[in-house]
């Protein structure tokens, strides 16, 4: 299990897949799933899903394939790319950032977001954050015509230059740990439950466009019409000096369950998990000897915000793995947390009781 999680996470992190451009990520997952003898469905939006039939309630377990990044807004006459942000890209870390720009042909071109030479920077400039509107990507080509000849144009996707490596003991570091680690966890879950001796009718979904206002999961949920939904994503680690007042989630201390999430801006969405589902997750973790961490915070949200509202409402919970440095180009998680999360999900699925109380009334 551990070896598979390392391999799949590192491989997936190397694949560019901006929101709306997840095709190569989906192909990797589809090939791995079909190699197990299972069939998949890709819907019109690009979500990848499969069903493992069983008796009991309909359970949807899902995670997102896409990553945040940039899109080309304008190409000037000197071949510099001006861009828009897609998703919560921190402006303060963009200057000097190596990036990858994908052409329509599927070929990728490396570039860098320009940064004014330090020797020419005035005292006041050294302590300011430039708006992304003032930044540009330098591909090293000298003209607009040369860039367009590569197949790069308005709307072309840009992501952090992919990196994926192991650091210290069992730490996975690099780009798009959010949420390629989640994809690796669900891929490993499929390997363990594919024979169908599970406590429920299981639907696994790898969603698109989560970073673009949570657009992918809702159409999939409307098709599946689940009774229960588990969303798998990062849980913010609070074990670094700048996050110590944010909570108690630590890297390497096991998977985590979100007890409360609220965006606090924009969509104003969030999730309060179903209490009976929380009890079952806690019981499963305890029976398997898995340490289950808890999180409650404002400032983030997941696909589950919309999925919980399908039909008469869906019994929901957010489960995840602790992660540091979210939305940066060098995120970090601990593979042992991925192992614990996978084991928890396998036990959750295999032992799910047919008598589970879906409604709030006794």
Image (spheres, grey):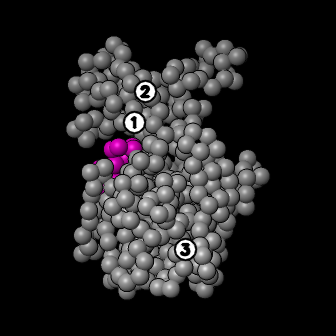
Do the numbered discs 2 and 1 sit on residues whose CB atoms are within 8 Å? yes
The image quadrant where one finds the C terminus is bottom right
Q: For mark 2, does the 10 Å Cα neighbourhood hold few (<14), some (14 to 19), or many (20 or more) residues?
A: many
Q: Residue at x 42, y 39 (%)?
A: 159
Residue in front for this viewpoint, 190 or 114: 190
Q: Residue at x 52, y 54 (%)?
A: 305
What span is colored magenta in the figure?
Answer: 16-28
Q: Disc 3 versus disc 1: distance between alpha carbons?
A: 45 Å
Residue labelled with disc 2: 83
In this rendering, does residue 158 appear at all? Answer: yes
SS class, disc 2: strand
Residue 309, horizontal then vertical, whole percent:
49, 57
Task: Using the image, tell me which numbered label, if any, was put on residue 158.
Answer: 1
Q: Quadrant of residue 131?
A: top right
Q: Nearer the viewer, mark 3 or mark 1?
A: 3
Residue labelled with disc 3: 359
């Amino acid at each position: 299990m551990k070896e598979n999680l390392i391999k799949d996470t590192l491989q997936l992190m190397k694949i560019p897949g901006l929101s709306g451009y997840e095709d190569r990520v989906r192909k990797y997952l589809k090939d791995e799933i079909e190699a197990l003898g299972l069939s998949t469905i890709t819907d019109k939006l690009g979500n990848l899903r499969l069903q493992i039939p069983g008796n009991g309630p309909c359970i949807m377990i899902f995670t997102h394939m896409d990553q945040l990044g940039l899109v080309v807004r304008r190409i000037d006459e000197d071949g510099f790319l001006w861009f828009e942000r897609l998703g919560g890209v921190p402006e303060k870390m963009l200057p000097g950032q190596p990036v990858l720009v994908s052409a329509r042909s599927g070929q990728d071109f490396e570039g860098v977001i320009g940064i004014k030479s330090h020797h020419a920077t005035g005292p006041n400039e050294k302590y300011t954050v430039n708006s992304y509107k003032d930044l540009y990507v330098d591909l090293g080509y000298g003209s607009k015509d040369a860039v367009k000849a590569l197949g790069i144009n308005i709307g072309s996707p840009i992501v952090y230059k992919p990196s994926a490596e192991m650091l210290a003991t069992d730490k996975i570091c690099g780009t798009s740990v959010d949420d390629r680690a989640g994809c690796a966890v669900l891929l490993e879950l499929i390997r363990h439950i594919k024979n169908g001796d599970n406590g429920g009718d299981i639907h696994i979904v790898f969603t698109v466009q989560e970073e673009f206002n949570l657009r992918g999961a809702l159409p999939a949920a409307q098709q599946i019409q689940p009774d229960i939904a588990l969303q798998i994503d990062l849980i913010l680690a609070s074990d670094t000096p700048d996050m110590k007042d944010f909570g108690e989630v630590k890297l390497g201390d096991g998977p985590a369950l979100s007890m409360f999430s609220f965006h606090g801006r924009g969509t104003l969405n969030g999730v309060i998990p179903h209490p009976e589902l929380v009890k079952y997750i806690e019981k499963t973790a305890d029976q398997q000897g898995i340490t289950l961490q808890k999180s409650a915070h404002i400032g983030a949200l997941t696909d589950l915000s919309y999925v919980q509202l399908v039909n008469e409402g869906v019994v929901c919970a957010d489960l995840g793995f602790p992660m540091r440095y979210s939305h940066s180009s060098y995120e970090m998680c601990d593979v042992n947390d991925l192992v614990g999360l996978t084991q928890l999900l396998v036990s959750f699925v295999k032992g799910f009781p047919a008598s589970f109380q879906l409604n709030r009334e006794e």
